[in-house]
Image: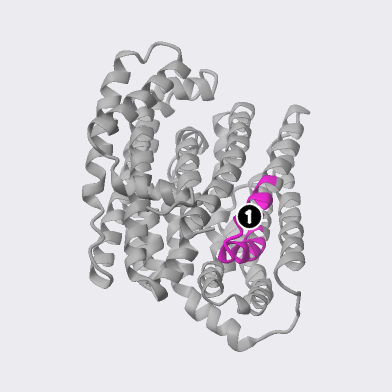
């Protein structure tokens, strides 16, 4: 199996799992939104978002670091993974104490406090099990990551929907998440110990110190990234109310899920390869970055255009006529999809060439910009202001990534790759707007055909794409 085949295989495996899990999660979120109402759905998203933010202190970048280090030297797998898991035990305890202290300071009420504790426990357990997933990713065995993701999501969705249909509320759903976190560690550790490493309780304090120091840029990047994605929900809860949080997340969650599916499956597959190419083949690294960004742009622009034009149709379908106020936020947030997809590749490139410090700085600046914008816009424009802040912050992040890549690596010439996909998506949107009132499934099918024909007429595909297909088929060009 050549490298192109291996990357596509890993993208396919990861993509299949993420599509399945995302569809299950999406159905679950739809039912949560319908069962809980705007205020209850807002409580869920506030508790989940805040604990997700705080739990970044359990990892501090260790998981991302061991992907890079094990990808370069697989013989270190057992030593790195076992010490990383042992390191996370005290970090987990300190994180839970932090959650408890902040909950006491905010004093959101007894039920909301319990929700914060339960979702905090789940996210801590998920971060620990993520150490084993990093091992699978470093070995480019994404089928094990897929197995984990599917098992976890089936458990949460099946049991979660079950308790909702039986008439139980959000508190019982939170307990389902805790049970899922316990299952996560059991499944991930079991696969690791059977297939890759031997368990060990031997502590190498020198290695753990090294992981903390070297992982810190990754950790700060993750912290800033969670701020980037979740601070709008937290600030809406603090500055407005649960209803605003519920409406905003009704618009944000589907779009975030779409972008995370595509960007996650591609970055997970190419990150180990990029890390290896940085040491062995600089020319291939440059080519892989440009091609990955180009294909993600081709995928992202039509999704953004379609969601913008058909926002009211999608919101009406998702929420059975409810959450009408989410339509304008959905339209605004749709614009961030192509930017987010390409930024994932540029950010991955910075990490793979040992410039994670620049990635951290870029995400930190963008997260601070996002916080400031949210604090300015939310009091006046509520969730509409939060949506605008998200898009503008994404654009700033992309600009910073490109700048630091140019400073430390060289011009990867990405911007010109986006002209034709953007033009084809704009043409598609104009034509779809004329027929937007007919059957939604038919509209989506027609839109896809229009976009593909537009790309072909614009000459988007050429010899490079033919060579990739030949490599995928295992043929020489």
* In the rendered image, the vertical position of residue 94 relative to residue 1, given as above or below: below
* In the rendered image, the vertical position of residue 207 relative to residue 362, given as above or below: below
Magenta part mainly helix, strand or loop? Answer: helix
Quadrant in the picture for residue 384:
top left
Q: Secondary structure at mark 1?
A: helix
Q: Quadrant of the N terminus?
A: bottom right
- Left or right for 7, reference 413: right
| Residue 70 pos. (x, y %) | 56, 73
Q: Which residues are magenta?
A: 126-150
* Residue at 57 percent of width and 61 percent of height: 140
In front of the other: 277 or 200: 277
Q: Residues within 10 Å of mark 1 (few under 14, many from 20)?
A: many
Answer whether residue 127 is magenta in the image: yes
| Residue 462 pos. (x, y %) | 28, 43
Q: Answer yes or no: is residue 336 visible.
A: no
* Residue at 51 percent of width and 75 percent of height: 72
* Residue at 71 percent of width and 41 percent of height: 154
């Amino acid at each position: 199996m050549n490298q192109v085949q291996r990357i596509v295989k890993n993208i396919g495996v990861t993509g299949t799992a993420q599509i399945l899990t995302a569809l299950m999660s999406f159905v679950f979120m739809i039912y949560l939104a319908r069962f809980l109402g705007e205020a209850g759905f807002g409580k869920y998203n506030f508790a989940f978002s805040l604990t997700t933010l705080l739990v970044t202190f359990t990892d501090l970048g260790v998981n991302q670091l061991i992907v890079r280090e094990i990808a370069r030297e697989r013989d270190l797998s057992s030593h790195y993974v076992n010490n990383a898991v042992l390191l996370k035990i005290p970090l987990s305890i300190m994180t839970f104490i932090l959650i408890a202290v902040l909950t006491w300071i905010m004093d959101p009420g007894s039920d909301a406090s319990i929700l914060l504790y339960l979702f905090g426990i789940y996210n801590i357990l998920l971060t620990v099990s993520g150490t084993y997933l990093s091992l699978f990713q470093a070995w480019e065995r994404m089928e094990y990551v897929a197995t984990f993701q599917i098992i976890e999501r089936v458990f949460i969705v099946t049991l979660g929907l079950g308790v909702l249909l039986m008439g139980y509320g959000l508190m019982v759903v939170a307990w389902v998440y805790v049970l899922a976190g316990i299952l996560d560690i059991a499944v991930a550790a079991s696969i690791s110990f059977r297939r890759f490493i031997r368990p060990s309780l031997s502590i190498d304090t020198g290695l753990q110190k090294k992981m903390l120091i070297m992982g810190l840029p990754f950790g700060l990047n993750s912290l800033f990234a969670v701020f980037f994605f979740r601070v709008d929900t937290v600030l809406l809860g603090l500055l407005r109310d649960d209803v605003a949080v519920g409406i905003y997340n009704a618009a944000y969650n589907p779009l975030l899920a779409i972008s995370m599916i595509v960007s996650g499956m591609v970055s997970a597959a190419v990150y180990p390869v990029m890390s290896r190419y940085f040491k062995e083949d600089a020319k291939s690294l440059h080519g892989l970055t440009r091609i990955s960004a180009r294909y993600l742009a081709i995928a992202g622009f039509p999704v953004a255009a379609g969601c913008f034009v058909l926002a009211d149709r999608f919101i009406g379908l998702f929420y059975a006529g409810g959450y009408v106020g989410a339509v304008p936020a959905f339209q605004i947030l749709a614009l961030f999809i192509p930017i987010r997809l390409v930024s994932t590749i540029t950010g991955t490139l910075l990490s793979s060439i040992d410039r994670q410090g620049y990635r951290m700085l870029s995400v930190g600046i963008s997260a601070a910009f996002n916080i400031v914008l949210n604090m300015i816009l939310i009091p006046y424009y509520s969730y509409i202001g939060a949506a605008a802040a998200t898009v503008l912050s994404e654009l700033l992040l992309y600009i910073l990534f490109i700048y630091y890549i140019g400073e430390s690596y060289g011009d990867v010439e990405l911007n010109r790759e986006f002209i034709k996909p953007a033009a084809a998506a704009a043409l598609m949107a104009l034509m779809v707007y004329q027929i937007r009132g007919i059957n939604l499934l038919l509209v989506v099918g027609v839109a896809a055909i229009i976009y593909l024909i537009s790309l072909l007429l614009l000459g988007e595909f050429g010899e490079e794409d033919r060579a990739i297909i030949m490599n995928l088929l295992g043929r020489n060009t």
